Amino acid sequence: MAAAPTIDQTKLEAFMGQFVQDMGAAATAPLVVIGDKLGLYKAMADGTPVTPAELAERTGCRERYLREWLCQQAASGYVDYSDGAFRLPPEQALALAEDDSPVFIPGAFQLLASIIKDEPHITERFRSGEGMGWHEHDHDLFEGTERFFRPGYLANLVASWLPALSGVTAKLAAGGARVADVGCGHGASTVVLAEAYPAARFHGYDYHPESIERATQLAKQAGVEDRVAFVLSMLARVVPEAPTR
């Protein structure tokens, strides 16, 4: 019979500390999604301290649940608490309430929430060895990905990423350039480019019908539908395959 392993108490305590931190982060993620979907952060974005009752009046949500949500958010450092009122500091407001901010993060939490929803399907793939297509994921993955990456595109794509490529911006500005975005998803980067370079023409390709539909809507909302076309195409599909045995 093998001897019992010697436990390093210091290492065990360090690991348990990491576990508690990870558990807190995991518990916070769905509550950030709730705050985002219900507009709670936006309702607090002016930085004015609010009580649960005042936030309930602003948002139409129930005070009882908002009190618990606010307390958790304060314990996690997402909002401040003092004398019975809660306040969203300007730094957190920039990250949680301003969709176009370069540090906007709710999309990342929405993306993470989709992974939890997909867990049963992914677990089964571990047993079967089959792949899981992009189209098989929960809707929050598609929307969360767009909302997470879009702020980075707004802040960097035109200002620094494209200028780092020799001659590209000049071609886009001159007219006659045609750009293909393969695997465009919701088309966030394509729309940003179309807004910046009206003389160029842009084509987004994706095999996911709902993403193409959403991308087309976003192009219309941005007023660039005259120079952007989103096309449903299997060329954008990478088919996951089971490993050979």
Image (tube, rainbow, N blue to C red):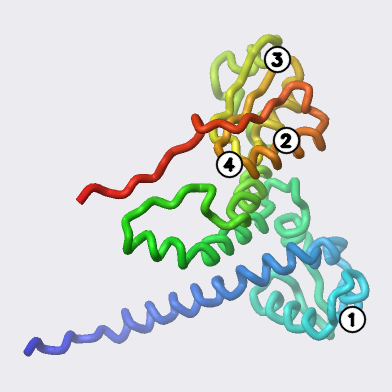
The part of the image, by quadrant, that contains residue 64 is: bottom right
**Residues tagged 1 and 4 counted as in contact (Cβ below 8 A):** no
- Using the numbered discs, state the Cα–Cα distance from disc 4 to disc 2 in whole angstroms: 13 Å
Q: Is residue 145 left or right of residue 50?
A: left
Whole-number angstrom distance, CA of label 2 to CA of label 1? 40 Å
The x, y position of residue 104, in whole percent, is 69, 52
Name the foreground residue: 235 vs 190: 235
Amino acid at dot 2: Thr
Mark nearest the camera among 1 and 4 is 4
Q: Which mark is residue 208?
A: 4
Circle 1 sits on which residue?
A: 53
Classify 106 as above or below 190.
below
| x 44%, y 79%: residue | 17
* Inter-mark Cα distance, 1 to 3: 52 Å
Assess whether mark 2 and mark 4 are in contact (beta carbons under 8 angstroms): no
Q: Can residue 208 be seen by looking at this rendering?
A: yes
Q: Image quadrant for the N terminus?
A: bottom left
At label 1, the amino acid type is Ala
Mark with earlier residue (1, 4): 1
- Asked if marks 1 and 3 touch (Cβ < 8 Å), the reply is no
Instruction: Say which amino acid is labelled 4.
Output: His
